[in-house]
Image (tube, rainbow, N blue to C red):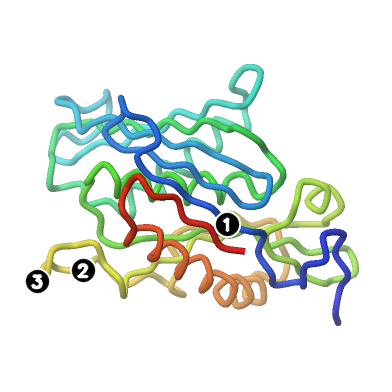
């Protein structure tokens, strides 16, 4: 069933993408990520000596700080921090710089839907910009399900508010690893997925649709990283 969306996109069509690296000169790595009118800045500081309390000193520590566009950090932002931390820990090589802490600061510039996936994408690019060792790249996407059962990808804020349920899905891009040649790859992930945050009934259907739609994100991410760090990349 074809669904008419207010911005004219098809069900699987993503909003225009844009990405820039090295946008904050005082950070060790940084990136901006746009999907439509949603924009997120990510800054990486570190690795700095010393792990955080209750962290394993034999591994590197990942710290995530979420800064909303306005107001104070609340329960939702703390949940986003936790999801981001777990996601980034799973794609970073934590044994290279043991007993260090790398901080990733997420600044929300504008939220017009699919905010957490945009933040994950921005953080991934910023980590590469900072030269943090990673097992593989990753891309995140939002999948929404309406009451009538149809599924749309990369929703706007208005579309999110009308949907019955949603899934945030993070897929690996391990074929295009950023590890040095000859390094050992990470463990294979179940269903080829890094992270999933779901409130949907038909999970595997959303997973299939999300995986297909993420191919464009993966291609855009690779092309963005192949450019000079000060260049910006755009895709419609």
Q: Residue at x 41, y 33 (%)?
A: 64
- In the picture, the quarter occupied by the C terminus is bottom right
Residue 150 position within the rendered picture, expressed as x and y whole percent measured from the top left: 82, 72
Which quadrant of the structure image shows residue 181?
Answer: bottom left
Counting residues from the N terminus, which is met first, the one under dot 1 or under dot 2? 1
Residue 182's tag is: 3
Q: Relative to 149, does residue 131 appear above or below in the rendering?
A: above
Residue topped by disc 2: 185
For the residues labelled 3 and 2, the Cα–Cα distance comes to 9 Å
Residue 3 position within the rendered picture, expressed as x and y whole percent measured from the top left: 86, 73
User: How many numbered discs, if any?
Assistant: 3
Residue 137 position within the rendered picture, expressed as x and y whole percent measured from the top left: 35, 61
**Element type at mark 2:** loop
Residue topped by disc 1: 17
Mark 3 surroundings: few (<14), some (14-19) or many (≥20) residues within 10 A = few
Q: Residue at x 32, y 48 (%)?
A: 229
């Amino acid at each position: 069933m074809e669904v008419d969306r207010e911005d004219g996109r098809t069900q699987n069509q993503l909003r225009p993408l844009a990405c820039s690296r090295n946008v904050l000169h005082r950070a060790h790595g940084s990136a901006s990520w746009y999907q439509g009118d949603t924009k997120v800045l990510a800054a990486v500081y570190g690795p700095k000596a010393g792990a955080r309390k209750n962290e394993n000193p034999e591994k590197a520590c990942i710290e995530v700080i979420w800064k909303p566009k306005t107001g104070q950090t609340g329960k939702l932002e703390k949940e986003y921090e936790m999801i981001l931390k777990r996601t980034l820990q799973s794609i970073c090589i934590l044994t290279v710089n043991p007993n260090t802490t790398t901080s990733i600061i997420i600044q929300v510039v504008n939220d017009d839907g699919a905010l957490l996936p945009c933040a994950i994408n921005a953080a991934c690019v910023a980590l590469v910009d900072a030269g943090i060792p990673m097992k593989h790249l990753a891309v995140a996407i939002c999948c929404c399900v309406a009451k009538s059962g149809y599924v749309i990808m990369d929703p706007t804020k208005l579309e999110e508010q009308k949907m019955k349920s949603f899934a945030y899905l993070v897929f690996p891009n391990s074929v295009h690893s950023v590890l040095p040649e000859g390094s050992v790859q990470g463990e294979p992930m179940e269903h080829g997925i890094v992270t999933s945050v779901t409130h949907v009934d038909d999970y595997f259907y959303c997973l299939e649709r999300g995986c297909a739609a993420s191919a464009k994100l993966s291609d855009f991410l690779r092309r963005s990283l192949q450019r000079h760090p000060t260049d910006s990349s755009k895709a419609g």
